[in-house]
Image (tube, coloured by chain):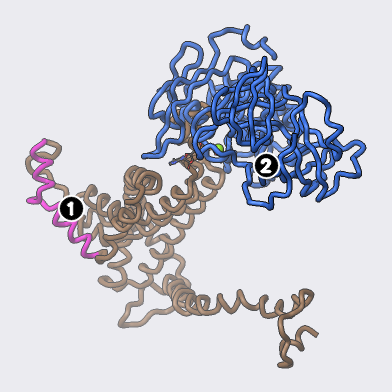
Amino acid sequence: MTALAHLGGAPTPTAPPGDRDATRGSYRLLPYLLLLPGAAWLFLFFTVPLLQLAAASLYDPAGSLSTGYALTWAFGNYPDALQAYWPQFGRSFLYAGVALVLALLMGYPLAYAIAQKAGRWKNLLLVCVVAPMFTSFLVRTLAWKTILSDNGWLVGLLRDVHLLGPDGRLLATPVAVVLGLTYNFLPFLVLPLYASLERLDARLLEAASDLYASPTQAFRRVTLPLSMPGLVAGTLLFFIPASGDYINAELLGTPNEYMIGNVIDSAFLVRLDYPQGAALSFLLMAAILAVVFVYLRRAGTEEVL
Amino acid sequence: MRQMGRDAGPAGDLRLADLTKRFGVFTAVDDLSLTVPQGSFFALLGASGCGKTTTLRMIAGLEEPTGGRVLLGDRDITRLRPYKRPVNTVFQSYALFPHLDIAENVAFGLRRRGIRAVRDEVTRMLSLVQLDGYGPRRPAQLSGGQQQRVALARALINHPQVLLLDEPLGALDLKLRRQMQIELKRIQTEVGITFLHVTHDQEEAMWMADTVAVMNAGRVEQLGAPADIYEYPATPFVANFLGQSNLVEAEATGLDGDDLLVTAHGSRFAVPVGRARSRHGRVWLGVRPEKLQLVADPGRVPDGRNAFRAVLTDICYAGVSTEFLLRTGWGQELSVFTANADPDPRLVPGAEVTAHWHPRHSFVLPRGGEHDVPAEETAEPVPDRLGAGT
Ligand SMILES: Nc1ncnc2c1ncn2[C@@H]1O[C@H](COP(=O)(O)OP(=O)(O)OP(=O)(O)O)[C@@H](O)[C@H]1O
Ligand SMILES: [Mg+2]
């Protein structure tokens, strides 16, 4: 009866209370309909290229773009790539990790201040956090190149106070790359952290201090655990793109600071070694997935930090 | 009544001295001074928004006073950080930690003070508030009343010198509320902690507390034992906030022996001098509804009693008692409570009745300007069908 009422075009005024199944059929389909555009998009522009990339990583390494590639299931591409470029792998995670620590040290207090202490300045400060995004990533990194340049004010200042030797420099050092990474990805850490700190009920901190928790203990036992979701999300949003980044190392570093992103970039665009580039891409993905997996496992049990 | 707590050491009284809190131009607590004796059960009673929570927050250290001092014994704790005060709070909003289970919520205070073996104490506390076995749950999985009891356990477990309770039973149903009241009173007597209990339930305040302070607009209007305040309120506000009162505009006209004579709307009433807070000029004549007796026949009023005539307008049956609403000749609505035993069949709406009471049950309060007209008084004009009696 219910399906008929729907299809038959009979003017059914408002469905009687017991007539809930009338719409149940279409409700069941609704989620899938909503998923469809996104899923199709992902399939065409993510899954298909990913499979192509996977195939490319198993091409015969002897081939080239001009002679053509043959899919020879050359699994040896993987150990070969790893052997040739493990230092860049290590560097990627090292730089991203150090940048993450710096970003946490700056980003947590920043997010906390905006969420809990900023009052009516909250929205303005949030805009300030996001504002750099209005210029392109490349332009921002180029600006850092100027800031850190040998005759810039920063290097001059550091030389004057003897933190840098007379011909010490920042540009073209690991420090510059890490600073660039920290700066460029900081908003990705701050925004999710802000979101969870914003929801923190100040009355819980009052209750904690009423129950003998010093400010440090209240932070450790109440604020930190309650901001955990934002912290985990922000850390991932920071770490994943930072460890795959190549622009900071390219513009602010030298080949000695190159990260795995630079190697993949050159494999595809300079050396035109597609199998190697593809293999490195998959290795990077696998490594990041492994790191994220371990991290989430520990975060789930609130043991991170 | 119970003075044992005091002997435990006079050093433990909680004293508020000229405590004031302003938010901008708004004065939430106005020059409040009171002493809560050590080991007493002290109730702070007042309408919503009169500054009760603000007062507690200043005692707990969560709000900095604009002026005045908080003293615990001889110790000035006005500027002491909250986590250093031997004071715990049961918050009006519970403020349970959502990321901790119930057991850890209750253990929070003990753990912060470095006490490791908390299991037994937590179990004991949970069973005290009738939440045995709820330890592993999260606060979000509890009902409002259960959360409230967790908040109680979480504060009580610390055995503070002063326990501040901000409407700790507000979310409970009548039966559980009663049980918890008994339980709270028992705990208080047992452990001898000073309880400062905020409520706007006047029955709860009178039933539980040794001393009640009635607050209005940031000030204490009256402070004393529940029975003293109830029987002889100091202001019209107290007269109507703690229970109900019939307050009639009157003029004091002179003394007659030990009685003060007052005239109200053409009738004369006598009040013992000891129950008059003003002997001259404009006054309120007050009498509690349950002190009034109704008779249908004016001739049956005993000698020496105050009386007036009125029309019975409404009868509200409330189980243990019945409330009769009377319209007096001068158009005021007054109420009479009568225990429900052998109701007089002639007392029906529309009947002319006489209400009478013993002079010692009346009280007289000074009547200032228009501003202190008591809230209960309804002054709708009605046809003047009756002359004032007596
Ligand atoms: N932070 C604040 N800023 C401004 N005004 C405030 C603040 N806190 C409280 N007030 C005001 O102070 C007055 C007293 O508030 P308080 O919370 O002490 O009332 P209360 O007696 O506890 O009322 P209730 O019985 O409804 O809980 C109220 O009018 C309130 O609006
Ligand atoms: Mg309150």
Percent across and percent down for residue B160 are 58, 21
Q: Is residue B362 left or right of residue A47?
A: right
Query: Is A142 placed above or below B102 here?
Result: below
**Mark 2 residue type:** Ala
Percent across and percent down for residue B80 are 43, 22
Chain B, colour shown: blue
**Mark 1 residue type:** Ala
Question: For the point 8% across and 38% down, which residue is it?
Answer: A160
Secondary structure predominantly adopted by residues drawn in magenta = helix
Q: Which type of secondary structure does the marked residue at label 1 adopt?
A: loop
Magenta-colored stretch includes residue B374: no
Chain A, colour shown: brown
Magenta-colored stretch includes residue A148: yes
Percent across and percent down for residue B119 are 67, 27
Q: Which type of secondary structure does the marked residue at label 2 adopt?
A: loop
Q: Mark 2 points at which residue?
A: B171
Query: Is B355 placed above or below A40 here?
Result: above
Give the crowd class for mark 1: few <14, some 14-19, many >=20 residues within 10 Å.
many
Q: Quadrant of residue A68?
A: bottom left
Distance Cα–Cα, label 2 vs label 1:
65 Å
**As rendered, which of A138 and B282 lies closer to the eye?**
B282
Tell me if I can see residue B116 in this picture: no
* Residue A172, disc: 1
Question: For the point 82% across and 38% down, which residue is it?
Answer: B321
Q: Give the range drawn in magenta.
A: A138-161
Q: Is residue A157 left or right of residue A28?
A: left
